[in-house]
Amino acid sequence: MIDWVEVLANAIWIVGCALALAVVSYANWTAGIRDEKMRVALGRPRVKTALGLAGTLFCLGLAATSHTILEVVIWLALTGLFAIQTIKDWREFRHSTVISARPKIDRPG
């Protein structure tokens, strides 16, 4: 018999790994297109947000598959840290998007 709860728990960390791989691949591609270093591409708020989400999913999935209380506590603590960092990066991304979307007004002065 298939344990669907276990399948779902494992799917969470697998999706986190797949997301991280996709984000790093995309950052590598954009760095190549723009002729810049990978570090610059990975430092963008949009990329950092996606990597933080991937880390959050990965840690959450491993917390769900852990068997001892200590493992669960450690993975949930890491999940919380990744979630906090992801929220900060998302706010930075939103802030940079709002600033770039505002029309520039030439004022004499």
Image: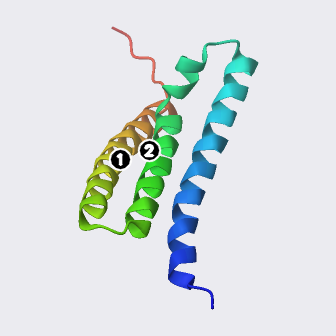
Q: Is 74 on the left-hand or right-hand side of 4?
A: left
Q: Are marks 1 and 2 in contact (CB under 8 Å)?
A: yes
Please rate how many residues cluster around mark 1, counting C-alpha atoms within 10 Å: few if below 14, some from 14 to 19, many from 20.
many
The kind of secondary structure element at disc 2 is helix
Residue drawn at (59%, 58%), measured in percent from left and top? Answer: 15
Q: Is 85 on the left-hand or right-hand side of 43?
A: left
Residue drawn at (68%, 35%), measured in percent from left and top? Answer: 26
The residue type indicated by label 2 comes to Gly
Q: CA distance from mark 1 to mark 2?
A: 6 Å
Q: Which mark is residue 52?
A: 2
Q: Quadrant of the C terminus?
A: top left
Q: Which mark is residue 72?
A: none
Q: 46 or 109, which is in the foreground? A: 46
Q: What color scheme is it? A: rainbow
Q: Quadrant of the N terminus?
A: bottom right
Please, which residue is most extreme toward the top here? 109
Q: Can you tell which quarter of the image residue 33 is in?
A: top right
The residue type indicated by label 1 comes to Phe
Q: Position of residue 67 (x, y in %)?
A: 36, 69
Please rate how many residues cluster around mark 2, counting C-alpha atoms within 10 Å: few if below 14, some from 14 to 19, many from 20.
many
Query: Relative to 49, is 96 above or below?
Result: above
Query: Relative to 3, is 19 above or below?
Result: above
Which of the two discs, 1 and 2, labels the residue nearer the N terminus?
2
Residue drawn at (63%, 42%), measured in percent from left and top? Answer: 21
The kind of secondary structure element at disc 1 is helix
Q: Which mark is residue 82?
A: 1
Q: Position of residue 91 (x, y in %)?
A: 36, 43
Q: 104 or 51, which is in the foreground? A: 51
Q: Is 23 on the left-hand or right-hand side of 42?
A: right
